[in-house]
Image: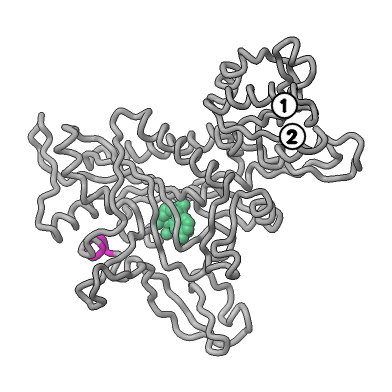
Amino acid sequence: MEKIISLSKRRGIIFPSSDIYGGFGSSYDFGPLGVEIKRNIKEAWWRDMVQMHSSVVGLDAAILMSPKIWEASGHLSVGFADELVECKECHKRFRLSELKEEECPECKGRLTEPKQFNLMMKTFIGSLEDESAISYLRAETCQGIYVNFKNVLDSMRLKLPFGIAQIGKSFRNEITTKNFIFRMREFEQMEMQFFCDPKDADKWFDYWKEERLKWYENLGLNMDNLKIYEVPEGDRAHYAKRQIDVMYNFPFGWQEIEGIHNRGDWDLSRHSKYSGVDLSYTDPETKEKYTPYIIETSVGVERSLLAFLCDAYQEIEGGRTTTTESTKEIETVLKFHPKLAPVKIAVLPLLKNKPELIKKSEEVFNMLSKEFICQYDEAGAIGRRYRRQDEIGTPYCITIDFDSLEKNDVTVRDRDTMEQERIQISELVEYFKEKIKD
Ligand code: ATP
């Protein structure tokens, strides 16, 4: 993890938030490359979950919502609280579920009895800071979906089963925030809520589970590092009739990256009760009336990014790109799937002090950057430039040499095979489109 954290900072993927002020508890900023990876993850998710499913539509609900929503959802009661203990000596707090011993893991001091600690982030709306002004930053994006169920159903003329998908920020006042971006207080979720007839809930649960596993596989994740855990009754979230945690084998152990839940009719029944608005559904053919069941898939953008990053990280011994330098050196390669790579193509003129090569390289860059995120780099020996690109996971490097001027072609180098091919400049866009699609 230390190496991944340091690479992330050095190469502009992830910075600690408020860095020049010494950081700010478990908040992180995504740098120029991190923001591209995040965008790629979100785009891949939206494409697979919304664009490619005619029965799924999108939504972008507000972060600030009526506090009644959080009463109805159970988040303001014990349903959304962690059990905490405090050390009587050093006064640090710990999640009871994460303690391995009965004493303080930091100073071995004695611990208090566990207390409930609610994770909702409170805020005040408007100029008064009294009880009536209290609101909350949403702790999950899905509540915005449930309270829009009727709006979407009526406005889009949909029939069950159908899904509503959303990507957006969520906030939780987490207690333990170790392990880099694994657990943060501000993070993004990609959630899809599928509304169906209760009779079909098991079938849809299995369907979405398979779809979600395929998503990871299609994005190149090593499936040996992924497993599912069927959460037994008693350990499930307060709303879940069935729950699967999709677990990834992080350097710090197996941890959840995605939750798939059968939420039953919990959400719509509760919102019907608390709002007074009937959220049941009448089947237009059978005239049967019921409260739909919800199958939810919920994954964190940053948490999945961390999984993809750990999975892509490879150290290769022996200096595979630099032949003249030490062969004992270790080279770092991020073997991202081309779809996730922050930079798809690096454009590298062979020499920087040759104006004709620079001019041609700029032409190639301008042509390709209309279609792909590209980087232009003319500084340093070519081997070293390849290496800089390998380190950020760029799948393809293009070099422009003197032959390029005459033959209008370039050398394309593949990050993984390191094979090089000459390709006509006029064919490059099609060539890369073919390579980068899945
Ligand atoms: P955990 O047990 O790890 O706190 P959870 O079971 O509370 O997670 P859910 O409420 O099911 O998580 O949220 C769904 C997904 O949202 C998680 O699988 C994770 O990817 C992401 N997520 C939840 N909390 C955080 C957080 N504090 N930081 C980053 N991602 C998070």
Q: Position of residue 433 (x, y in %)?
A: 55, 21
Q: Position of residue 80 (x, y in %)?
A: 35, 66
Residue nearer the viewer, 272 or 132: 132
How crowded pointer 1 is (Cα within 10 Å; few <14, some 14-19, many 20+) is rated as some
370 sits to left or right of 414 = left
Give the residue drawn at x 85%, y 36%: 322
From the viewer's perspective, is residue 160 above or below residue 256? Answer: above
Magenta region: 70-74
Q: Could you tell me how many numbered marks the image carries?
A: 2
Q: Which residue is label 1 attached to?
A: 358
- For ligand 1, give the image quadrant: bottom left
Mark 1: secondary structure = helix
Residue 378 circle label: 2
Residue nearer the viewer, 106 or 432: 432
Q: Position of residue 393 (x, y in %)?
A: 66, 38
Give the CA distance from mark 2 to mark 1. 8 Å
Considering every residue shown, the one lying at the far front of the view is 355
Asked if the residue at tag 1 contacts the one at tag 2, i.e. Cβ–Cβ closer than 8 Å, the answer is yes
From the viewer's perspective, is residue 84 above or below residue 388? Answer: below
Give the residue drawn at x 18%, y 38%: 153
Q: Amino acid at mark 2?
A: Glu
Q: Position of residue 68 (x, y in %)?
A: 20, 64
Q: Nearer the viewer, mark 2 or mark 1?
A: 1
Residue nearer the viewer, 125 or 250: 125
Mark 2: secondary structure = loop
Q: Main secondary structure of the magenta part?
A: helix
5 sits to left or right of 248 = right
Residue 231 visible within the image: no
26 sits to left or right of 160 = right
